[in-house]
Image (cartoon, rainbow, N blue to C red):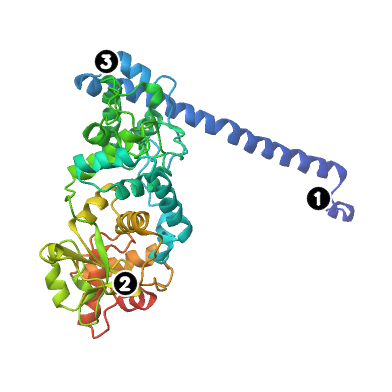
């Protein structure tokens, strides 16, 4: 039987030394794990990537007419960029990003911060005169007004000032190998190889954004092949350095998606309470004369042009009753093809108006919308879906199908239709 001595209640010098050595050993082991395990894992992924290139991608590229010389040049020194978003490590399943899921959805008005809009409009006006001949020639050929092209150019890359720091083959290769949208990026990667194979751009010029979009118009490679044009007549398409090619390529893109010559994008309007906000959407169009007959008027007392009264228009209320309202033309939805967002298309239309007519803001103001989390809005969307409403997608973003479904539910339940999510709705629909 061993009896502890009172003096042993206080650790001895030997015991202290032993504990320090043990802690140091644990620290060094942890440090070694951090230092060596990540590179080892990255090296393993690099090896898997190279095997995927040769055994999976190369046979398909070869079948599409890509030479081995082009293929090898494109991927010379390329490794997966593990810092890119929306990646899925080999052997793992996709996960919903917590940040994206929980991010607050603020007022749509934040998208139209004056500093952001003015950078596009003042920059557009500054370049309008310098490119007047080019813009006039493009409008004559394609029917797209110069101010629309300038607004897109400014919004996408700050008129070419934004740097394209990524290698397109690194980005597209990484995402085709290990992203949540592998099929989409594989198609774009093969298109990028085709661009090089056809001599449309050398490998070294294939600089892109973090998403693989190319040049000043931010075209994905498939869009480059379909829409990019040589407008300066130098015998090659250059959306990285040639302003005429950049602007004409944007116009060609819009025409291919149905731009209607002679019509604008839309008009800001006032919508009386007697007109339900649930009438919004590109699938609920009416002749503009019909909207006018319901009491909808252009702001500022301007009448609708006679030619517009006979044409189709669509109610657009991006913040429901908590923001400005518009009658959009089919050209608005062509702008939306450039970036599938109502706010983006509205930004371009509004920016173009300001480039052409001066920096006048919307007449209607953007009201508060409660700063809900995207998860709250997604829960509301799922609740509406369960009740038979079409919200488009329960993604936490209130698109027009969600907005009008909210309005229909509110009206059905004896509430004033606002057509926009708020905390009370989230609670009521749980």
Name the residue tied to disc 1: 2
Q: CA distance from mark 3 to mark 1?
A: 81 Å
| Image quadrant occupied by the C terminus | bottom left
Measure the C-alpha gap from mark 1 to mark 2. Answer: 76 Å
In this view, the residue in front, 323 or 52, is 323
Task: Find residue 415 and report its image quarter.
Answer: bottom left
Q: Residues within 10 Å of mark 3 (few under 14, many from 20)?
A: some
Q: Secondary structure at mark 1?
A: loop
* Residue found at x 24% / y 80%: 272
Which circle marks residue 420 in the picture?
2
Say if 376 sits above or below 146 in the image: below
First in sequence: mark 3 or mark 1?
1
Location of residue 179 in the rendering, given as x and y in whole percent from the top left corner: 35, 39
Viewer-side label of 1, 2 = 2
Q: Nearer the viewer, residue 353 or 375?
A: 353
- From mark 2 to mark 3, how far is it between C-alphas? 53 Å
Circle 1 residues within 10 Å: few <14, some 14–19, many ≥20: few
Q: Which residue is mark 3?
A: 67
């Amino acid at each position: 039987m061993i009896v502890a001595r009172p003096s042993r209640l206080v650790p001895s010098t030997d015991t202290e030394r032993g504990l320090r050595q043990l802690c140091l050993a644990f620290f060094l082991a942890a440090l070694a794990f951090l230092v060596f395990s990540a590179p080892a894992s990255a090296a393993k992924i690099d090896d898997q990537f190279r095997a995927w290139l040769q055994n999976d991608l190369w046979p398909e590229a070869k079948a599409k007419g890509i030479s081995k010389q082009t293929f090898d040049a494109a991927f010379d020194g390329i490794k997966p960029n593990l810092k890119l978003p929306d990646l899925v490590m080999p052997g793992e399943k996709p996960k919903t990003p917590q940040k994206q899921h929980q991010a607050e959805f603020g007022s749509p008005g934040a998208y139209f911060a004056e500093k952001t809009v003015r950078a596009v409009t003042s920059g557009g006006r500054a370049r309008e005169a310098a490119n007047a001949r080019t813009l006039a020639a493009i409008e004559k050929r394609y029917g797209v007004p110069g101010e629309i092209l300038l607004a897109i150019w400014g919004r996408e890359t700050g008129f070419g000032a934004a740097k394209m720091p990524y290698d397109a083959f690194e980005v597209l290769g990484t995402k085709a190998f290990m992203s949540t949208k592998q099929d989409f990026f594989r198609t774009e990667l093969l298109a990028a190889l085709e661009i090089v194979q056809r001599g449309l751009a050398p490998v070294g010029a294939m600089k892109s954004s973090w998403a693989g979009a190319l040049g000043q118009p931010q075209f994905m490679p498939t869009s480059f092949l379909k829409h990019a044009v040589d407008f300066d007549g130098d015998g090659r398409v250059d959306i990285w350095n040639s302003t005429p090619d950049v602007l004409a390529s944007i116009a060609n893109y819009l025409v291919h998606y149905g731009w209607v010559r002679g019509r604008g994008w839309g008009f800001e309007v006032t919508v009386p309470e007697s007109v339900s906000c649930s009438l919004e959407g590109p699938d609920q169009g009416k002749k503009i004369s019909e909207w006018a007959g319901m009491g909808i008027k252009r702001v500022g007392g301007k009448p609708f042009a006679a030619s517009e009264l006979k044409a189709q228009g669509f109610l657009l209320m991006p913040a429901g009753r908590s923001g400005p309202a518009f009658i959009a033309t089919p050209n608005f939805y062509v702008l939306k093809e450039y970036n599938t967002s109502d706010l983006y298309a509205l930004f371009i239309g509004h920016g173009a108006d300001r480039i052409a007519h001066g920096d006048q803001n919307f007449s209607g103001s953007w009201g508060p919308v409660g700063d809900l989390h995207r998860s709250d809005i997604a829960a509301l969307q799922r609740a509406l879906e369960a009740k038979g409403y079409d919200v488009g997608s329960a993604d936490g973003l209130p698109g027009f199908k969600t907005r009008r479904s909210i309005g229909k539910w509110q009206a059905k339940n004896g509430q004033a239709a606002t057509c926009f999510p708020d905390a009370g709705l989230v609670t009521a629909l749980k």
